[in-house]
Image: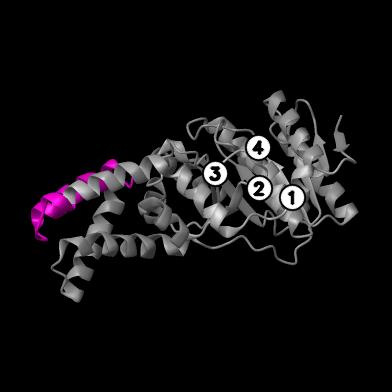
Amino acid sequence: MFGFLKSNKCAPEAEAAPEKPKDWLARLKSGLTKTREKLGSQLTQLFGRHTKIDDDLYDELESILIGSDIGVAPTMHLLEQLRTRIARDRVTDVTEVKRLLKECLLDMLAPLAQPLTLTAKKPFVILVAGVNGAGKTTSIGKLTWYFREQGKSVMLAAGDTFRAAAVEQLRTWGERNNITVVSQQEGDPAAVVFDTLQSAIAKGVDVVLADTAGRLPTQLHLMDELKKVKRVVTKVIADAPHEVLLVLDANTGQNAVTQVKAFDDALGVTGLVLTKLDGSAKGGAIAGISRFKSIPLRFVGVGEDIDDLRPFNARDYVDALFD
């Protein structure tokens, strides 16, 4: 019934030298090109038209921020903080507003920058959820490489049994990372996860990454099945899953907030992964997530390479968004 796949061929990507931080920042800036160019152009025009800080400037700034996918509630919060800081510092120079706006946005996003730290739990179980097309299975492959670079042993559960392509995709990532993938072509995702955990315990594996079938928040019967997977995990290991990651497509903009709420209600999301910051992404959506609920943004992804998923750094992100 179940398939255990392990490749003996080491992935060439895993042998590559780590990328320099400045190269990563350049890739992040490239991924936020669309939002940055739109935001930067509009801010430049705004500050060129206004010679003083007044209500008209704030009104136009509000429209620009909302139009950059930052969202209404986050924009109101940002402007409130901006007004407070301008008053506190007695700023009168319009050219200083952009710098202060960056500081306010950084203050908003900084609490999200909480890297995922593996505890002594063995196996450390990570349940990965998200809608179809968000990049969930690919993110699992990249997370595998990330943990393997830390010297951790990893096992994958191909729990997306509704899509044969997803199972094959995960098997491919297993081959690239030289690790075991437990799979079943069709059937019960919870059974796949159960079998994976039993095997991981027996073999002393450090990390288990469990893929789940992509679903829309409106598909209540499928969300119920996702809850079943979590219950099965808890039956095998009482305090697991130790992390519930929700993968979000950066191009969904404010729809990401709706997804966070739905999956959090069903699973209790403990961390987020933002994918597809590929140049057309709606980068401002992170601000909306930060105001909805303080769920850490664990990782951001900027491309298709195996090392294109990195821990979220709020300052790098804000710099890439504005500069």
Q: Quadrant of residue 121?
A: bottom right
Q: Nearer the viewer, mark 1 or mark 4?
A: 1
Circle 4 residue: 137
Tell me the quadrant of the picture where the C terminus can be found. bottom left
Circle 3 residue: 302
- Residue 289 placement (x, y as % from top left): 41, 50
What is the secondary structure assignment of the residue under circle 2?
A: loop
Q: Which mark is residue 16?
A: 1
Q: Quadrant of residue 13?
A: top right
Q: Is residue 57 magenta?
A: yes
Q: Which mark is residue 307?
A: 2
The span shown in magenta is 47-71
Mark 1 to mark 3: distance in Å?
Answer: 18 Å
**Which numbered disc flags the more N-terminal residue, 2 or 4?**
4
Crowdedness near tag 4: few (<14), some (14–19) or many (≥20) residues, C-alpha within 10 Å: many
Give the residue displayed 59% in from the left and 53% down from the top.
Answer: 310
Mark 2 to mark 3: distance in Å?
Answer: 9 Å
Task: Find out whether the residues at labels 1 and 2 contact each other: C-beta distance under 8 Å.
Answer: yes
Under mark 2, the amino acid is Asp
Q: Nearer the viewer, mark 2 or mark 4?
A: 2
- Nearer to the camera, 232 or 303: 303
- Nearer to the camera, 145 or 51: 51
- Residue 321 placement (x, y as % from top left): 39, 51
Q: Nearer the viewer, mark 1 or mark 3?
A: 1
- Residue 135 placement (x, y as % from top left): 58, 36
Display coloring? one colour
Crowdedness near tag 3: few (<14), some (14–19) or many (≥20) residues, C-alpha within 10 Å: many
Crowdedness near tag 1: few (<14), some (14–19) or many (≥20) residues, C-alpha within 10 Å: few
Give the residue displayed 78% in from the left and 34% down from the top.
Answer: 171
